[in-house]
């Protein structure tokens, strides 16, 4: 069981939260090619290691926030609000 | 050595030393015509069909760990072809038909048991959706039969059939040709048959990079056992597909998740069919050893850890006990997870990659075991001929750009 720290409510069990996948994805404009749009919609780095993702405290305050987490150890490396700049974390590849 | 009753008798008389290893453990050659990355079911089947269907025997299967130690050894061993769209129906039905003749084909008992699969309807809406589903299957030429509540009760009397149940059982449908197969035997059977045709299976051989020519095409791999050259390379690495794609310089529409399963202690025969309750998520069968095999849901956050979270374990057990209350007396023996490659439309990707001479078979997500024969057959075809197999044509990477998705998650209402 992971322990996630909601920036508003503090540490809570994993089953109070829902993960919504990779964060910091910027939506391209409507003028882009089909290939570019496909990449935006579907293609992900899916790293084995540090992954930056968005979570929502569904069964709590309902707020969204960002998490940097290791996908092998499940260690949470950073938790930060949606509007905060992403903090550096150890072990993140290029 | 051909396995037979006579060989068994001879072995029994002459002692265990008379058996030869089922496959060799050769040293890597400097070059192969084709390299397949991943010695799970899909990779081994690919090598076997390369040799058997296309006469390409100068093949190596590279495996980071041990043969069949990934998802092939971690799934709940269920085979079926109850899909909704014609493209999927053709693909999975071809796979089930290959499974039906696989024991004889490989001279290795894969212990296929076509005990049927029952899907439970818990509401009026489930009943409607399942009639549509079963009818779509029949339109595609695949066996499907709607079941009344009493027919379900007769087939699996331990179900909670009370009208007061939290998830009352109103009926369902069955594919009688669905069932289970011994998962390890599928890997071992393909490995042994491929080895007999000259394929080298290289275990403990991790791919760490690709070598490229001036046009960007792959010319070989860097491995933990040294560089190996190859004309063409196929990837069959399930949850680790993105890691290999990254080494080759492209990305995939894949997210890796941990898919859980667990078994109880063995018990007397109590369930002679597979039961799936899409409404609760319970997915139950009894193994030949007597264990209740409980699958399987995803931990819905990206993971490369081959273990599931306890939060979801509790959920799976609650679902299972909701439909089989008497199983509450059984103790859980083992729980584990495999890393599965989930794509947005829950359909596989079998074909070329953006990198010349590099091909991939991935995206089976939570349903890769049943696809092993057809996954190997179609990846071998594209590796040998350079053209996608007719069955695999709809299942190309391009569909994520064109939008022509084959959304079985939405169509059939279950992830796989």
Image (cartoon, rainbow, N blue to C red):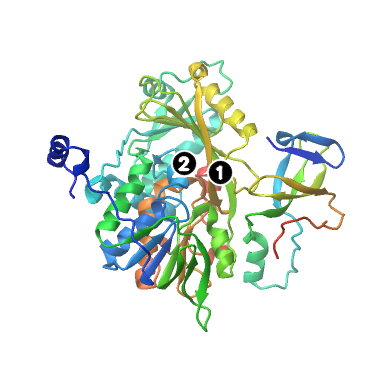
Q: Which of B125/A71 is in front?
A: A71
Q: Residue at x 38, y 30 (%)?
A: B287
Name the spot of residue B309 as percent of width and height, x first: 62, 36
Q: Residue at x 33, y 43 (%)?
A: B185
Q: Residue at x 37, y 43 (%)?
A: B184
| CB within 8 Å, label 2 to label 1 | yes
Tags 2 and 1 both on a single chain: yes
Residue B168 visible somewhere in the drawing: no
Name the spot of residue B369 as percent of width and height, x first: 42, 46
Residue B182 drawn above or below residue B344: above
Answer left or right for B108 relative to B165: left
Residue B74, numbered circle: 2
Q: Which of B141/B211 is in front?
A: B211
Name the spot of residue B262 as percent of width and height, x first: 50, 32
Residue B397 drawn above or below residue A4: below
SS category of the residue bearing label 1: loop
User: Disc 1 sits on a residue from what chain?
Assistant: B
How many numbered marks are there? 2
Answer left or right for B191 relative to B401: left
**Quadrant of the rendered structure where residue B274 is?**
top left
**Quadrant of the rendered structure where residue A36 is?**
bottom right
Query: Which residue was labeled with disc 1?
Result: B306
Q: Which of B115/A84 is in front?
A: A84
The CA distance from mark 2 to mark 1 is 10 Å
């Amino acid at each position: 069981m992971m322990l996630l720290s909601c920036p508003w409510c503090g540490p809570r069990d994993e089953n109070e939260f829902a993960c919504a996948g990779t964060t910091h994805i910027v939506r391209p404009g409507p003028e882009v090619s089909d290939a570019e749009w496909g990449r935006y919609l579907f293609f992900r780095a899916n790293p084995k290691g540090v992954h930056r993702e968005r979570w929502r405290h569904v069964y709590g305050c309902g707020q969204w926030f960002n998490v940097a987490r290791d996908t092998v150890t499940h260690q949470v490396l950073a938790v930060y609000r949606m509007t905060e700049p992403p903090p550096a974390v150890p072990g993140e590849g290029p | 050595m051909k396995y037979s009753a006579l060989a068994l008798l001879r072995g029994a008389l002459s002692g265990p030393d008379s058996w030869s290893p089922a496959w060799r453990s050769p040293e890597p050659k400097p070059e192969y015509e084709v390299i397949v990355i991943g010695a799970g079911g899909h990779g081994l089947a690919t090598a076997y069909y390369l040799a058997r269907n296309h006469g390409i025997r100068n093949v190596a299967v590279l495996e980071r760990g041990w043969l069949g130690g990934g998802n092939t050894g971690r799934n709940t061993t269920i085979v079926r072809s109850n899909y909704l769209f014609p493209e999927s129906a053709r693909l999975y039905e071809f796979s089930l038909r290959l499974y039906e003749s696989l024991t004889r084909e490989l001279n290795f008992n894969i212990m296929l048991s076509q005990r049927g699969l029952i899907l439970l309807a818990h509401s009026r809406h489930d009943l409607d959706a399942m009639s549509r589903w079963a009818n779509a299957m029949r339109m595609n030429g695949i066996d499907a039969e709607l079941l009344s509540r009493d027919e379900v009760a007769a087939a699996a009397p331990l179900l909670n059939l009370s009208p007061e149940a939290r998830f009352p059982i109103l009926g369902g449908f069955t594919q009688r040709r669905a069932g289970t197969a011994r998962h390890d035997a599928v890997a071992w059977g393909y490995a042994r048959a491929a080895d007999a045709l000259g394929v080298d299976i290289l275990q403990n051989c991790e791919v760490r990079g690709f070598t490229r020519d001036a046009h960007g095409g792959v010319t070989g791999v860097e491995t933990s056992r040294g560089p190996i050259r190859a004309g063409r390379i196929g990837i069959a690495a399930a949850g680790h597909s993105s890691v290999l794609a990254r080494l080759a310089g492209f990305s995939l529409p894949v997210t890796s998740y941990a898919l859980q399963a667990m078994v109880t202690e063995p018990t007397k025969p109590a369930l002679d069919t597979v039961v799936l309750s899409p409404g609760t998520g319970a997915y139950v069968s009894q193994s030949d050893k007597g264990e209740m095999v409980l699958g399987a849901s995803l931990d819905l956050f990206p993971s490369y850890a081959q273990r599931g979270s306890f939060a979801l374990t509790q959920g799976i057990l609650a679902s299972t006990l909701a439909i089989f209350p008497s199983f509450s007396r059984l103790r859980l023996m083992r729980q584990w997870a495999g890393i599965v490659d989930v794509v947005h439309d829950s359909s596989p990707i079998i074909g070329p990659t953006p990198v010349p001479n590099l091909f991939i078979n991935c995206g089976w997500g939570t349903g890769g075991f049943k696809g092993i024969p057809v996954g190997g057959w179609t990846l071998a075809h594209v590796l040998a001929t350079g053209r996608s197999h007719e069955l695999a044509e709809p299942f190309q990477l391009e569909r994520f750009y064109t939008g022509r998705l084959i959304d079985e998650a939405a169509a059939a209402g279950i992830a796989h």
